Amino acid sequence: MRKGEQITGAAREELAREMKQQYEAGRSIRAIAEAYGRSYGFVHRVLTETEVSLRGRGGERPRRHRGTAAHAGR
């Protein structure tokens, strides 16, 4: 499979199955995209087509601290 090559039919179904399996095993969309030489959008679209339940965004979320300007009036 060459980068940017259109994938259709049985080849796309097989690729979608592999990507779904990897995603469900915990691999990120970005990691899958890099491994296959595809874009994030392509992998996201393929996973959506397989009706996989997509995880929320990862990483630590910023916290608001008590005593900041946003809470000064409370």
Image (spheres, rainbow, N blue to C red):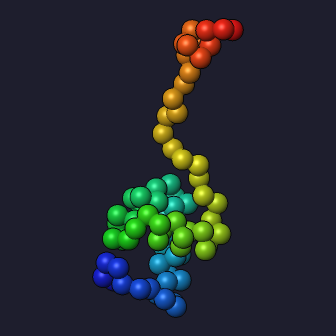
Q: In terms of depth relative to the viewer, which is nearer, 2 or 22? A: 2
Q: In terms of depth relative to the viewer, which is nearer, 41 or 9? A: 41
Q: How many numbered marks appear?
A: 0
Vertical side of 36 occupied by 23: above or below? above
The answer to whether residue 21 shows anywhere in this view is no
Give the residue drawn at x 52%, y 91%.
9
Give the residue drawn at x 64%, y 60%.
53
Vertical side of 31 occupied by 43: above or below? below
Vertical side of 21 occupied by 59: above or below? above
| Residue 26 spot, x, y in % from top left | 50, 54
* Quarter of the rendering occupied by the N terminus: bottom left
* Residue farthest left in this picture: 2
Give the residue drawn at x 60%, y 58%.
54
**Is 31 situated left or right of 52 in this image?**
left
**Is 33 situated left or right of 67 in this image?**
left
* Quarter of the rendering occupied by the C terminus: top right
| Residue 5 spot, x, y in % from top left | 36, 84
| Residue 52 spot, x, y in % from top left | 62, 65
The answer to whether residue 24 shows anywhere in this view is yes
The quarter of the picture where residue 70 lies is: top right
The quarter of the picture where residue 37 lies is: bottom left
| Residue 19 spot, x, y in % from top left | 49, 69
